[in-house]
Every structure is written in structure tokens, then in C-alpha cells.
Image: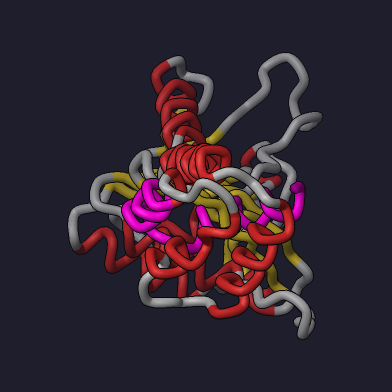
Amino acid sequence: MTDLFNIVAEMAFELPPERLDFIAVQAEKMQTSINISKLKKAWGVNTDSALFERFFANVEKTHISGTELATAIRSATATSCYSTKQGQVELLWTGPETSAVPLRYTEQALCELINAAQRKLFIVSFVAYKADAVINALNSAILRNVEVNFLLEKSKNFGGSVDIDSMQNLKNQLPGAKFYTWFTKNEPNLAVVHAKCAVADDKFALITSANLTGKAMSDNMELGVMLRKGNLPRQLHKHFEALITENIITIEE
């Protein structure tokens, strides 16, 4: 029975909810697996022949009742719809590729996030330099009146911990952007801005190991996730808003 339930769960992520509901209605009319021919007619246009065959083979093998099968289909559909509502997560990778799992590059996903922004962008990085494709996307965002905000670690010349003055470099390249810094008053130089992430409005978020540098975007081995919609981008957006409102991070003029 477990195999069948796993297949039903797979169906819920492969087929539209309306089609699954129609199959569930037809399944309820099925007294036993002997009546499976009627259910096959309800399947409609087959988008995955392997899934189709596995589903019906397991229905016949388990001798499940039509009511039980309909309940399983509806439960899996509801779970899939709830999961979609909570948001989509995509794995990101920069570095050596394998044939086992196709993954998107960090730079591609970050540029997609920037291009999707309509109102506000917030980007956090330890350092930032030589990320030309990202800078071009950010300039385009500024031109369409998107508010672009950065939180960066300050250079050693200004009390920070990095040799490169990322803030000044980006100010030259992105004159329309806002820049924030964080100081720990009680223990200077013992804590740094080490997070790497980006948020577009409250709908898209990217969390990554990659700094905003050319090497991190194209050469280093970096791992991250892209979050589309759901609660997490909203939470991260609100968190940065609160950091500003509560003066935990302050704007650099």
C-alpha cells in the first residue's frame, strides 16, 4: 500500500488539482480494483506514461476500494496545494557540475531575483566587487525606480574587517543605491556582517554562501537556495525593515 500512496503523492505534484479531483470522483464510483477500466478512462491525456502505468498497476495489486483511493488522492492534492502556497524552494550551486542533478548557478538566480523586484531590494554581503552581471541588473532595477539597499561589512580603514572598500566601489557603480552598516558598540571588530542574502520585495529571497564577487558568482564552490513566495521571504523582508527602524543598522551618507 505504501508504494501506491507514494505514487499518489507524486501525482499530486505532477498533475493539476482539477484533474486530480476528477480522478478522485471517478475513483469513488469504483467498487473494487476490478472496475479499474472505468478509472483509466478518467485519466484523460496522459502526460507521464510511466507514472500512469505504475499508478494503475499498484491499484490493481493492492485491491484498494474506490473510497479509500479517492481519499488518498484528495489528501495528497491538498498537501501539494498547501506546499505550493508556502512557497517554492530551488537549490543553487556554483562550482563543478555533475550529471546526477541539474542545478542553477547562483549568479543566474540572483539576477532573476533582481529583475523580479518591483519596489525594493535588500542585498547583504561580506564583500562585493567584480560582479558585473549583477551590477548591470541592479542598475536596471534602479532605472525602473526599485529601491536598492545594501548591508556590507566596512573596510579596515573605517573600522571594519575587510581590506576592500566594497561600499565605495558600489557607490561609484550604483549611485542610486542606499548603503547600511552595522557596528557592535561593546565589542568592536569581534563581530562582522557575514550573512549573504538578497530579498526582492517580500516575495523572493536568495540565501547563499556566496559573496557578491566575480569569483563567488562563477568559480568558487558555493551553495544556496532560492525561495519564491511563501512566508520566508516575507519574514526576511520584515527582519531587515526592523533592523533599519530600530537603528541596529544605520545608513551611510
Of 137 and 248, the residue lying toward us: 137
62 to the left or right of 137 = right
- Give the residue at x 76% y 31%: 191
Q: Position of residue 29 (x, y in %)?
A: 41, 47
Q: Is residue 83 at all visible to an observer of this figure?
A: no
Q: How is the image coloured?
A: secondary structure
Of 128 and 117, the residue lying toward us: 117
What span is colored magenta in the figure?
1-26
Of 68 and 11, the residue lying toward us: 68
- Give the residue at x 64% y 46%: 64
Q: Is residue 162 above or below residue 135?
A: above
- Give the residue at x 39% y 52%: 26
Asked if residue 213 lies in the magenta stretch, the reply is no
Q: Residue furthest left?
A: 144
Q: Position of residue 106 (x, y in %)?
A: 59, 67
173 to the left or right of 153 = left
Of 222 and 187, the residue lying toward us: 222
Q: Taken as a whole, is the magenta stretch helix, strand or loop? A: helix
Q: What quarter of the picture does the C terminus occupy?
A: top left
Q: Residue furthest bottom?
A: 99
Q: Is residue 9 at all visible to an observer of this figure?
A: yes
